Image: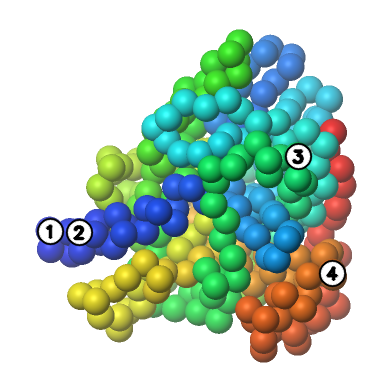
Amino acid sequence: MAYDSAFIDRETLITLGMREYLIPRVLPIMLHSSRDNTMVQYGTGTLLRIGEAHFLITAAHLFDLNASEVGLYISDYTPPKSNYVVPLGRIRVVRGKLPFDGGVFGDDPPILDVAVIPLGDDIIAQIPNRKWLNMGHIDTDGEDVAGRYLLCGYPTELTATNVAEQVVTYRLPMVYSTEIYQGPISTFRTYDKRFHFLLCVPIDGAVPIAGSTRPRANRIQGISGCSVWRTVGSSSDRTNWTPAEAKVVGVQSSEYSDRKVAKCIRWSVVLSIIWLFFPEIRELILLGQPHAHDRFESFKRDFCDLLTEHQIT
């Protein structure tokens, strides 16, 4: 789809207005292999705080790994600075079950490809420059309405690591604006409208944003787990738009590469998982989502068998 220059200029202004939200709260996740002593950019995560509980939200398939051979790392603060990596170490992971153990899931992604990781004080203390989403950033009622959507993630090929010095250097994240996919879905395995919505991904349907070259489809490896934002609705007045209107609505989990379509987990699924596994903060969740109790309990009754919990050491 072609966009005129005025439209792209407006999209760029909107995205630049959100940068304070996006970069400090969305972070790269690195993978270190002890077998060959390599470190690569592996995925993208988003930081969420509910009261005194702190979480890293990302894609479940990032944790389909052999913990004895690899380790996961995050880093403090923002690109294009270099910074020492922070090992996640022993962490509790609540995630969707994968269709099989080991390897890449290819064309058969898990139904709930999302993971919720509570972060302890030891990790939080090592990322003091990071910022956190809160309940005010979240919208679970309009996750796939017409409008413009924005993804922000860290492609593998745009990140450089120095294993010997445990330093990572990464450029500004790939940020692009796109729209809801409205084409045929009959060939999309494991797609379920209750859990997912679909977005057009580069090249078709995407608008290049300042600070990011027009991304190609083969350059999105590494953004799995990034947050998805709805910036404006179809009827919104862009003239008076402010970043406060943008809401996080999902987590990008996988791509139907033959159709250039991204599958995104609804943020209501993220909150349902937190509701199920972290009952001590349910009252705080209801303060931000006062009418969502029945939705969370329905998820608990019907879909908790799609989830698993384990420790990574």
Report whether 147 appears left or right of 33: left
Q: Which numbered disc, 1 or 3, marks the residue that appears first in the sequence?
A: 1
In this orientation, which residue lies closer to the viewer: 37 or 188?
37
Instruction: Give the numbered dot on residue 280.
Output: 4
Mark 2 lies on residue: 8
Q: Nearer the viewer, mark 4 or mark 3?
A: 3
For the residues labelled 4 and 1, the Cα–Cα distance comes to 50 Å
Discs 2, 1 touching: Cβ within 8 Å: yes
* Badge 4: residue crowd in 10 Å (few <14, some 14–19, many ≥20): few
Residue 77 higher or lower than 245, as above or below: above
Residue under the point 57% across and 56% down: 132
Task: Mark 2 vs mark 3: give the one in front.
Answer: 3
Q: Residue at x 76, y 56 (%)?
A: 96
User: Is residue 1 or residue 313 the one in the foreground?
Assistant: 313
Tag in front: 2 or 4: 4
| Residue located beneath label 3 in the image | 122
Specify the amino acid type for callout 1.
Ser
Disc 4 element = helix
Pick whichever, 221 or 136, lies toward us: 136
> Could you give the CA–CA distance between mark 1 and mark 3, rounded to whole angstroms?
47 Å
In the rendered structure, the answer to whether residue 202 lies left or right of residue 132 reads left
Residue 16 at what x, y percent from top left? 29, 55
Disc 2 versus disc 1: distance between alpha carbons?
5 Å
